[in-house]
Image (tube, helix red, strand yellow):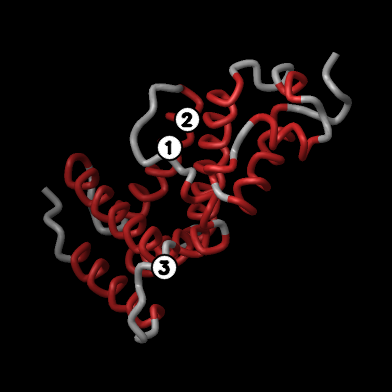
Amino acid sequence: MPRVGLTPAAVVGHALELIDEQGPEALTLAAVAARAGVATPSLYKHVSGGLTELRRLIAVRVTEELAEQLSTAVQGRSRDEATEALLRAYLDYARRHPRRYAALPQAPQEEPELQHAAARLVGVIVAVLRGYGLEGSEAIHAARTVRSVAHGFASLSTSGAFQLAEDLTVTQERLIGVLTQGLRAWPTA
C-alpha cells in the first residue's frame, strides 16, 4: 500500500528539491527516497518505471512550469511588449531555478504528456508572434529564433559564461531590442 501523502506529484516535488540543491546529476531513486522518508523500493509504487519515469515526470513538470510562467508574463500584452515580457520571464525562470532549468529537455520526446507540455510552451511563443502577423511556416521560423535567443541567453547566463564586467541587464536590453526589431521586419508570407 502506498504511503499516505506520497503521490507521484510529491515524489517529483522531492526530486525537484534535490535537483535545485545539488543538480540533475545528483538525482537517484535512493536520494529521492531518503528525502521522502521511504525505502527506495517504495518509490516504485508511485513511479513504476523507476528513474527513467521520474526523469520524464520531472521534464513534464519543468516544461509546464516554464510554460505557465511565460503564459502569465505575456497575458494582456502584444508585439514588442509581449516579446520583452516573454524573454524576461524565460530568463527569470532559468535564474531562479538554474539546476531545474538544466533538466529541461531541449529535444522533442515521443511521450504524449511531455509533448503536450512542450506544445503549450511553444504555443505561448507562437501566440506572441501572431501579434506581428506571423502565421504558418514563418511563425515556425520565428518561434525557433525566439526560442534560440531565450534558451541561449538563459543557458549562458546561468552557467556563468558571461564573465566580462559589463552589466548583463544592458546586454539583455540590447538583445530584446535586436529581436523585436527583427520580428517587426520579419516577412509575413
> Which residue has dot 3 on it?
160
- Circle 2 SS class: helix
Q: Amino acid at mark 2?
A: Leu
Q: Is residue 35 left or right of residue 1?
A: left
Q: Nearer the viewer, mark 3 or mark 2?
A: 3
Tell me the crowding category of disc 3: few under 14, some 14 to 19, or many 20 or more residues within 10 angstroms, Cα based: few
First-in-chain label (3 vs 1): 1
Q: Which residue is mark 1?
A: 118
Instruction: Kindly identify the residue that appears in the image at 11 percent across and 55 percent down.
Output: 187
| Residue on which disc 2 sits | 114
Residue in view at x 43 percent, y 44 percent: 121
8 relative position to 78: left or right: right
Choose the circle earlier in sequence order: 3 or 2. Answer: 2
Quarter occupied by the N terminus: top right
Is residue 173 placed above or below 2 in the rendered structure? below
Residue at 35%, 67% in the rendered image: 161
- Which of the pair 52/81 is nearer the observer? 52
Rendering coords of residue 37 (x, y %): 83, 34
Spot occupied by residue 189 in the image (x, y as percentages of width and height):
11, 48
Q: Going by the image, does 10 lie left or right of 113? A: right
* Residue in the foreground of this view, choosing between 64 and 159: 159
Residue 137, position in %: x, y? Answer: 18, 40
Q: Are marks 1 and 2 in contact (CB under 8 Å)?
A: yes
Looking at the image, residue 28 lies above or below residue 89: above
Residue found 33% across the figure and 68% down from its top? 80
Q: Nearer the viewer, residue 32 or 75?
A: 32
Name the amino acid, label 3.
Gly
Type of amino acid at the residue the image marks with label 1: Ala
- Density class for disc 1 (Cα within 10 Å; few <14, some 14-19, many ≥20) is many
Q: Is residue 42 above or below residue 157?
A: above
